[in-house]
Structures are given as structure tokens and as C-alpha cells.
């Protein structure tokens, strides 16, 4: 069956009262952005739905793939459109649709109708019953099952008439751009790209910061992070990725601070620098891929010690996730294979054999004082020499 339009259903944004148009406009914008890659489409609002119409030839699978990257979409329905809502015509339309879409008629069905136009001479129940009767007349092999049908045949009367029976799940969430911006600490691991995806799913724009430590970390390790940013940008939209040279700060920490506190102190400086870029990018919060207890630097005590340097809120969308749950999402969003490429990370290079798991903030602050004479200059240089890569 060939379709040249898709009816898009959205869930939560339908609940936004007077702000609803803002969410709808953002969804239209994000859909335009996503389908631009795959063809020429007309996108319009249609009374509680969005309509995506192909203006030209297009690839069905690619288009569905593109729509599945748009947060805010709950379902994608390949649809047949008509402008005549007269009952005899509707009945013909629905029968022709079913005939084409289901060559084998051996299935149970139920007709579901919606009328935006309440003046239509039949109510929704009558319309559904009458269309069901017409289908049974035409195709006696079909059976009605109102409780557990194989196929739901939808007929919606809006500005036009829409007939569909396939609902492909979208990613859910809210359109990107409706909930501010966050600065993601993006490493080359499995977790932080997933954290970026998760926060973006709630409508948040992201920019990102990556800390590398050349020559201890390679150019390939950096390319891997750029690739991960590219992969999530399919969902999040364009990302400014700040690549911070962290080597001198790490060496200073290594030289002057107790080794069991290295990771915590290093992470505190990462947060401070990330917050600087959050301010520059107009981001309201920081985001990390941390999950309680995953490693020594993510115990409750360690998270508290890391958090203590930030004035902006730090969101950790994976906080309650098990590793396998995070891996499942990374596979779904296609970052897993890139994340497991075996390039070194700056965190793993200067790592202590026995890191503290219950750091005391006062003790950590005391250790950090040993950096007093160098750290301001090192931070300044790290920020000034940062390379920003526009990823889309
Ligand atoms: P990931 O899989 O995301 O690398 P992880 O399990 O390796 O996470 P850590 O290395 O402790 O965990 O890092 C915790 C979080 O700190 C990461 O999810 C990320 O948000 C941030 N982070 C760690 N290293 C870096 C880095 N080199 N650049 C930017 N952010 C980092
Ligand atoms: Mg990591």
C-alpha cells in the first residue's frame, strides 16, 4: 500500500492548555528539521494532530526513521486523505482502504471514529457502527471484535477525512526547544550520550563539554566523542561541543593532591569548567551520565562532593538506572558500538588504585588548597584554549 501522508499523534503536549500552540509550533519545527534530510514534505497543524504530506517521491522507511527521532511524537500513522465526508463516500473510502491494505481479509476489526465537526449528522458511535456494517457487507470474511481486534480501522473527520490503521510508535517525550537548555558533560563512555538523549527527550536543548588530556588521550578518542555527539544530535538537534584541554590541570592535581582523592578533585574541576560553558551557552543546568554506586566516583558521598562546586542544578537522568538498562537505550539510539571502542579516557589515565568512596567535602577542599598558586591560571588557559566544534 502506498501512502503519501502521515498523521502524527502527540501525547503530553496536548495537555498544555494555553501554551499548547507553543508546543505544537516546536513540534512542527522539529519535524521539518528531521524530514528535511529525507525529502520534500509539507508540514501542517491539523486540529490536535500534525500532518506530514510528501510533495514528491520519498522513501517510506527513511521517512519513518526520521520521524522516529522527533521527541513529542507518540505515533506515526500512514494515512489516506480525502476531502469528502459524506457517508456513502466515507464508506467507499474505508472499504477501498481496507481492501488495499489487507489483501487477506481473515482478521477481526473494530472501527474507531473521531469527529472534530460535531455538526456531522451521525455521532461517532453511529458512524463507527455504520462503517463497520459496510465493511462486513463488502468483506464477509472479516469479523468484528470490539474487545481485542486484530486491526483498528480509524476514520477521523477533521478539516479533511483521514483513514488509517497502522500506528508506528514514536519516541514520546516533548519537542526539543520547549524546556530550556542544559550543558552535557559528554565523555566517550556509554552513559553520558544516553544521559544527553534522556534530557533532550524532555524538550531540552543541549550543548556539550568534553575534557581530553593530550598526549595521554589520543585524537581518535576525541573523534569518538565527536561521533557520539553526532549520533545524539539526530535526536537533540545541533550541539556545540567544547573540547577542553585538561592535561595541565590533571597533572597539577596528580602532583599536588592525595592520590586517593584524584578522581573527585578532577571531577570537581570538570564541573567548574562545564559551568563556565553553561553560562556562556545560556544553559540553565548541567547534565552528567552518573548513576548511584556505578563506580567509586558515583557513590552518594562522591556525588555530593562533586555537586558541591556547582551553583547550577546538576541533572543526572540515569541516576536510578542499572548498567544494562543504560546499555539497552544506547543500543536503541545507536551509540553503543561507538561507545565501546577502546580508546583511553582522561579519567582512566590518572586513576588511583584505591579511590575514596566516602569523600569528606572539607577534606577535599583542604586538598584543593594545595593547587591555590596555579589553578586560576590553569583554569583560565584551559578555557581560553578550548576548541568548539559545531556538531549536527
Ligand atoms: P560514561 O560512560 O558516560 O563515560 P562512566 O561510567 O565512565 O560514564 P565516569 O567516568 O565516572 O563514568 O564519569 C561520570 C560522568 O562524568 C560521565 O557520565 C560524564 O557525564 C562525565 N565525564 C566523565 N569523564 C568525562 C570527560 N572526559 N569529558 C566530559 N565529561 C566527562
Ligand atoms: Mg567515562
Image (tube, rainbow, N blue to C red):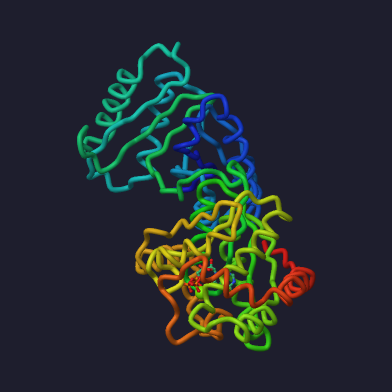
Number of residue marks: 0
In terms of depth relative to the viewer, which is nearer, 217 or 306? 306
Q: In the image, what residue occupies the spot 54% across and 82% down?
A: 258
Asked if 104 appears above or below 227 in the picture, the reply is: above
Q: In the image, what residue occupies the spot 40% across and 63% down?
A: 300
Q: Judge left or right: residue 149 versus residue 47.
A: left
Asked if 45 appears above or below 84 in the picture, the reply is: below
In terms of depth relative to the viewer, which is nearer, 131 or 162? 162
Residue 184 percent coordinates (x, y) = 59, 60
Can residue 57 be seen in this snapshot?
A: no
Asked if 358 appears above or below 313 in the picture, the reply is: below
Q: Judge left or right: residue 236 versus residue 107.
A: right
Quadrant containing the C terminus in the rendered view: bottom right
Residue 305 percent coordinates (x, y) = 50, 64
Q: In the image, what residue occupies the spot 31% across and 18% down?
A: 126
Residue 301 percent coordinates (x, y) = 42, 65
Q: In the image, what residue occupies the spot 52% across and 76% down?
A: 263
Can residue 269 be seen in this snapshot?
A: yes
In terms of depth relative to the viewer, which is nearer, 277 or 387? 277
Residue 350 percent coordinates (x, y) = 55, 85
Amino acid at each position: 500500500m502506498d501512502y503519501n501522508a502521515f498523521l502524527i499523534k502527540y501525547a503530553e503536549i496536548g495537555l498544555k492548555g494555553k501554551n499548547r500552540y507553543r508546543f505544537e509550533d516546536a513540534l512542527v519545527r522539529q519535524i521539518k528539521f528531521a524530514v528535511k534530510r529525507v525529502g520534500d514534505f509539507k508540514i501542517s497543524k491539523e486540529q490536535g494532530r500534525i500532518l506530514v504530506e510528501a510533495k514528491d517521491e520519498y522513501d517510506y522507511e527513511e521517512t519513518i526513521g526520521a520521524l522516529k527521532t522527533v521527541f513529542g511524537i507518540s505515533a506515526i500513522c500512514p494515512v489516506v486523505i480525502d476531502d469528502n465526508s459524506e457517508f456513502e463516500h466515507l464508506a467507499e473510502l474505508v472499504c477501498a482502504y481496507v481492501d488495499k491494505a489487507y489483501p487477506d481479509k481473515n482478521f477481526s476489526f473494530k472501527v474507531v471514529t473521531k469527529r472534530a465537526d460535531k455538526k456531522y449528522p451521525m455521532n461517532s458511535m453511529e458512524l463507527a457502527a455504520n462503517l463497520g456494517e459496510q465493511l462486513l457487507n463488502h468483506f464477509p470474511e472479516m469479523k468484528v471484535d470490539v474487545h481485542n481486534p486484530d486491526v483498528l480501522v480509524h476514520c477521523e473527520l477533521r478539516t479533511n477525512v483521514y483513514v488509517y490503521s497502522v500506528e508506528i510508535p514514536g519516541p514520546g517525550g516533548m519537542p526539543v526547544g520547549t524546556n530550556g537548555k542544559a550543558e552535557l558533560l559528554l565523555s566517550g563512555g556509554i552513559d553520558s550520550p544516553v544521559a544527553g538523549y534522556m534530557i533532550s527527550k524532555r524538550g531540552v536543548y543541549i550543548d556539550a563539554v568534553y575534557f581530553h588530556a593530550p598526549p595521554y588521550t589520543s585524537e581518535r578518542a576525541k573523534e569518538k566523542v565527536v561521533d557520539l555527539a553526532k549520533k545524539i544530535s539526530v535526536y537533540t538537534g545541533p550541539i556545540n561541543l567544547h573540547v577542553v584541554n585538561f592535561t595541565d590541570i590533571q597533572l597539577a592535581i596528580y602532583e599536588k593532591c592525595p592520590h586517593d582523592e584524584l578522581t573527585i578533585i578532577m571531577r570537581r574541576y570538570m564541573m567548574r569548567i562545564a559551568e563556565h560553558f553553561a553560562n556562556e551557552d545560556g544553559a540553565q543546568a548541567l547534565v552528567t551520565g552518573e548513576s548511584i554506586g556505578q563506580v567509586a566516583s558515583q557513590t552518594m558521598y562522591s556525588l555530593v562532593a562533586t555537586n558541591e562546586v556547582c551553583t547550577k542544578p546538576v541533572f543526572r537522568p540515569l541516576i536510578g538506572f542499572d548498567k544494562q538498562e543504560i546499555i539497552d537505550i544506547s543500543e536503541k539510539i545507536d551509540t553503543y558500538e561507538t561507545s565501546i571502542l577502546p580508546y583511553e579516557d582522561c579519567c582512566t589515565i590518572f586513576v588511583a588504585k584505591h579511590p575514596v568512596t566516602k569523600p569528606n567535602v572539607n577534606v577535599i577542599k583542604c586538598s584543593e588548597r594545595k593547587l591555590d598558586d596555579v589553578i586560576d591560571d590553569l583554569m583560565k588557559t584551559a578555557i581560553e584554549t578550548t576548541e568548539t566544534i559545531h556538531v549536527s
